[in-house]
Image (cartoon, grey):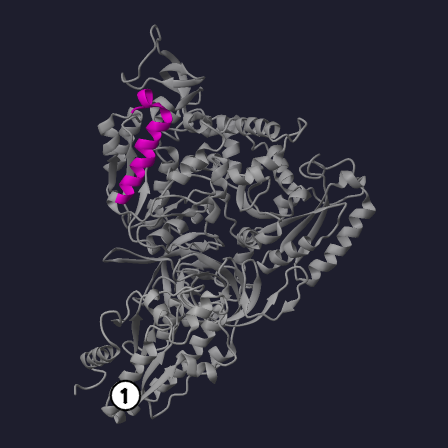
């Protein structure tokens, strides 16, 4: 008897999901957000199709407001042989100069990310998009399918999801309809960190503690990543030892104070953590059901 | 760089090493809102310290807002994901929850106990290794307890824990516990559940959930968590079952590499093993097993691998690799248990897309043998399955597949049914066994065949399938066409809807189920006549495209010509030769096509006749011209 560990089982399931998508859809894409979940998803995809190159491109829906270290990581991934990475910036958002300071977090996120993603999928004609979301992240995700059907308007109908049994996924659809597929559905945050450690997967250094220039906004620690960040009169960024549990647009992503500058230290912090990771994201706190509303509109 | 550290704290290193041995168990919880099921899961999450502080804060805030009264946490709220459900205070779908102990990671499928949601429970049970069924100690076994147990057993779950909850409300009475236990053990034995454990608990107070209760000194068994940490993981059991690898994807990385990728469903595979490809029956030998970029000497159930074979044999998606001496059976007709999941009922004779492991085939639903009353386990006669009903029927596939009975293998015996038009998942099922006629009765090959008979006739036999609304002009045009063909010496036969309903199909009415059967019989009769060498004209409203597709599937390419008599409803109703539209409008006729029953127009008919543009005579001439163009009949 050869007992498989929980990570081996999760890995096998994710790979199975990815191969189903490639076998059953016409034009899949993997959304690459540069975060740790994307890094794990990419690593799994390379395993799933080895020794062939990835049978789909990666897509980064950019907002122009990510951390500089994220862009450096993305560009490094884009240079990897066998990987095609496309970057999409919503032209409407560029034209209107949408940013989190003038327009607020919800408009910024809606136009750059939600609208941007929908336009990108339509423009490239992708009919299945892998996302790194996990069911443990947030309540409304706990009920989402692994193969999540979207109508031609990219809307998710939580009341009318296809039943998903065994590991039999129904990927049939009409023209214009599509799927969001979540191969990491059954992973937890801790699983992701353990797997990164076990498989030695490269991640953005922002996950590790370092001295960074920080200001406090609405109780969140915001790292001033470039000079586009407007400061209040007399406000001075302070150097504090912080790291991130989740990454997004830098003005909207809260850091946590930490000394964890290695992976084992990060995992130890995880074990002691009593705060779930999405709390670092300012967009979730609008209302109890904000994530569910965003999802219905096409946010990942 | 990630992963490097010169000073890994000892306790973290130990922790990470212990994680390497952690196993995964999936289980389902069944019970109603009142049984305290959500509270139980909340308690497991809370005591296993997987509830994060902000989740707890939200929980406290929402418990207060919903007016649950006191300061006790309402764990149930934590598990209700979607807004509307939260307002209704019930869970209506399947939610997956996660927690971990030092020994295992757990995935909990939380499904509702409410009557109309059988499909959700089936969904949750399909991936579960074990089930926790809750009962209220005050109420004992209820109808729903039996229903949940039956579904759990049907879905092949072998380990069931009966959590007898709310023991605090019966003063932790040993006698009450034993009453319920004895009754349940007897019932579980009767429905074939292999292993049963009964536990006295109180989810609200935590007795025997994670920690042993001081209030049940008479109880010697495990706590619920101890049970969950010890019960057998299904993937382990599957390693003892013969090897199966359904091929998901053929990896042709380069000219020298051809690998067959898939998730091993059962058994184990070693490099050097001989393998058989089902259903074709070809054989080869394993030269490499890849797990990602690593070469593996052996791989087991639960692993996703890529397998390379010694010989250049044909292997495609959907094929099943096995060992030659324990290969799966091959068949195209089955008896299966089906759980229906859609508002549109399952109809006899209708064709669905069937996905089984990595294979997709067409499946016709043959006679429903019976449906099962999930409350009493009685078998009831039935002609159709409604949503949330479970029945046993025969399935006929369009080709042979490699399979195992579901009770032997939960991967190669499980399938879903998909509607051809809407692409919705409408049903799920489990293969029971292959029908003997499918394995042993071979088609009798006769010396005088269709080709020989057709030669005698001087034309290609075919069926002209006239479809359109009542009053569209189908029979008129078909009749004119037949006269012209007959005049040319062609051997024809006209099957007319009304006439057939006076004889062969006089037992059928106009419900959806009967319409499907009506078409099935006519299509089979037409097939026999085509086989006899005739040009068959079928004039039937045949409103559903799935039935026309089913009819088409009976014939060889080019033999089935769909003739769409396209007349707008207003025009057909205006003619109303038989006065039927008037009756339908007055409500004297039910299920009348175009009025209160839909007509699904053909998307790509071979021939389309617009009766608002040409006369019936002109239409007959045009169709004849098309038959000449297709070479069915020679030119005049």
**Residue B62: x percent and y percent?**
57, 29
B468 to B480, vertically: above or below:
above
Does residue B276 appear anywhere in the picture?
Answer: no
Residue bounds of the magenta highlight: A99-122
Q: Residue furthest left?
A: B636
Chain ID of residue with mark 1: B
B188 relative to B7 in the view: left or right:
right
B444 over B283 or under it: above or below: below
The residue under the point 26% across, 34% down is: A90
Quarter of the image where the C terminus of chain B is located = bottom left
Percent across and percent down for residue B12 are: 50, 29
Identify the element where label 1 is drawn.
Answer: helix
Left or right: B12 in relation to A170: right
- Quarter in which the N terminus of chain B is drawn: top left
Residue at horizontal 76 percent and vertical 56 percent from the top: B183
**Closer-to-camera residue (A243/A237):** A237
Tag 1 residue? B483
Residue B306 image position (x, y, % from top left): 37, 55
């Amino acid at each position: 008897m050869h007992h498989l560990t929980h990570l081996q089982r999760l890995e096998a399931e994710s790979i199975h999901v990815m191969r189903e998508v490639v076998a059953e859809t016409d034009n899949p894409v993997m959304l690459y957000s540069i975060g740790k979940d994307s890094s794990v998803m990419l690593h799994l995809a390379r395993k799933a199709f080895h020794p062939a190159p990835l049978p789909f491109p990666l897509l980064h829906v950019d907002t122009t407001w990510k951390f500089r270290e994220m862009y450096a990581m993305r560009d490094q991934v884009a240079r990897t042989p066998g990987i095609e990475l496309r970057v999409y910036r919503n032209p409407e958002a560029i034209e209107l100069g949408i940013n989190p300071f003038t327009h607020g977090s919800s408009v910024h996120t809606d136009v750059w990310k939600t609208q941007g993603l929908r336009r990108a999928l339509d423009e490239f004609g992708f009919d299945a998009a892998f996302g790194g979301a996990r069911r443990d992240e947030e309540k409304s995700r706990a009920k989402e399918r692994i193969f999540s059907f979207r109508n031609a308007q990219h809307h998710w109908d939580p009341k009318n999801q296809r039943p998903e049994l065994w590991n039999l996924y129904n990927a049939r659809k009409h023209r214009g309809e599509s799927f969001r597929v979540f191969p990491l559905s059954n992973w937890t945050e801790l699983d992701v960190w353990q797997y990164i450690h076990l498989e030695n997967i490269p991640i953005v250094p922002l996950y590790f503690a370092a001295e960074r220039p920080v200001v406090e906004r609405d109780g969140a620690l915001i790292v001033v990543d470039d000079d586009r960040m407007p400061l209040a009169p007399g406000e001075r960024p302070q150097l504090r030892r912080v790291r991130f549990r989740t990454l997004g647009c830098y003005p909207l992503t809260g850091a946590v104070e930490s000394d964890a500058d290695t992976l084992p230290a990060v995992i130890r912090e995880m074990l002691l953590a009593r705060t779930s990771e999405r709390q670092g994201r300012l967009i979730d706190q609008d209302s109890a059901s904000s994530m569910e509303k965003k999802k219905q509109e096409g946010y990942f | 760089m990630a992963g490097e550290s010169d000073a890994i704290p000892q306790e973290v290193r130990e922790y990470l090493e212990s994680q390497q041995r952690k196993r995964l168990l999936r289980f389902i919880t069944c019970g109603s809102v009142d049984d305290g099921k959500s509270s139980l899961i909340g308690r497991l999450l809370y005591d296993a310290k997987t509830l994060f502080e902000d989740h707890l804060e939200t929980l406290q805030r929402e418990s207060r807002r919903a007016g649950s009264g006191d300061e006790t946490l309402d764990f149930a709220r934590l598990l209700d994901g979607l807004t509307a459900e939260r307002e209704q205070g019930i869970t209506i779908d399947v939610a997956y929850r996660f927690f971990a102990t030092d020994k295992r990671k757990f995935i909990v499928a939380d499904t509702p106990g409410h009557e109309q949601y059988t499909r959700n429970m089936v969904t949750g049970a399909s991936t579960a290794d074990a089930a926790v069924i809750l009962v209220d100690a005050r109420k004992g076994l209820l109808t729903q307890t039996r229903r949940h147990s039956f579904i759990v057993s049907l879905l092949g779950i072998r380990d069931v824990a009966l959590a007898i909850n709310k023991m605090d409300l019966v003063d932790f009475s040993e006698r009450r516990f034993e009453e319920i236990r004895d009754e349940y053990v007897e019932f579980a034995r009767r429905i074939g559940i292999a292993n049963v454990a009964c536990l006295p608990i109180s989810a609200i107070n935590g007795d025997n959930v994670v920690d042993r209760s001081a209030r049940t000194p008479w109880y010697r068994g495990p706590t619920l968590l101890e049970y969950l940490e010890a019960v057998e993981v299904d993937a382990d059991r599957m390693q003892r079952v013969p090897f199966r690898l359904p091929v998901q994807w053929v990896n042709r990385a380069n000219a020298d590499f051809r690998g067959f990728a898939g998730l091993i469903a059962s058994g184990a595979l070693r490099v050097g093993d001989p393998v058989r490809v089902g259903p074709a029956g070809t054989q080869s030998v394993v030269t490499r097993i890849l797990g990602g970029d690593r070469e593996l000497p052996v791989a087991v159930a639960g692993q996703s691998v890529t397998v390379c074979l010694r010989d250049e044999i044909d292997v495609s998606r959907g094929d099943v690799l096995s060992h030659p001496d324990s290969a799966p059976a091959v068949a195209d007709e089955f008896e299966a248990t089906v759980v229906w999941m859609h508002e549109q009922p399952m109809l006899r004779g209708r064709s669905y897309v069937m996905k089984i492991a990595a294979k997709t085939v067409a499946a016709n639903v043959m006679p429903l043998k019976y449906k099962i009353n999930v409350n009493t386990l009685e078998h009831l006669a039935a002609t159709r399955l409604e949503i949330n009903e479970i029945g046993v029927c025969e399935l006929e596939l369009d080709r042979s597949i490699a399979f195992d009975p579901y009770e032997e293998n939960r991967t190669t015996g499980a399938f879903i049914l998909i509607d051809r038009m809407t692409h919705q998942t409408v049903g799920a099922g489990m293969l029971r066994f292959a029908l003997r006629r499918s394995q042993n009765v071979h088609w009798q090959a006769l010396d005088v065949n269709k080709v020989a008979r057709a030669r005698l006739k001087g034309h290609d036999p075919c069926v002209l399938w006239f479809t359109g609304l009542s009053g569209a002009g189908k029979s008129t045009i078909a009749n004119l066409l037949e006269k012209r063909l007959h005049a040319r010496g062609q051997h024809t036969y006209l099957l007319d809807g009304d006439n057939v309903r006076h004889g062969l199909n006089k037992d059928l009415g106009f419900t959806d189920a009967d319409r499907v059967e009506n078409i099935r019989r006519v299509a089979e009769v037409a097939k026999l006549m085509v086989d006899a060498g005739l040009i068959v004209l079928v004039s039937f409203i045949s409103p559903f495209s799935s039935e026309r597709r089913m009819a088409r599937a009976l014939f060889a390419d080019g033999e089935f010509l769909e003739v769409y008599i396209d007349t707008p409803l207003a025009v057909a109703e205006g003619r109303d030769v038989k006065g039927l539209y008037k009756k339908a409008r007055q409500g004297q006729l039910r299920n009348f096509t175009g009025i209160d029953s839909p007509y699904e127009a053909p998307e790509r008919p071979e021939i389309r006749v617009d009766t608002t543009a040409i006369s019936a005579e002109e239409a007959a001439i045009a169709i004849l011209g098309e038959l000449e163009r297709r070479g069915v009949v020679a030119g005049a």
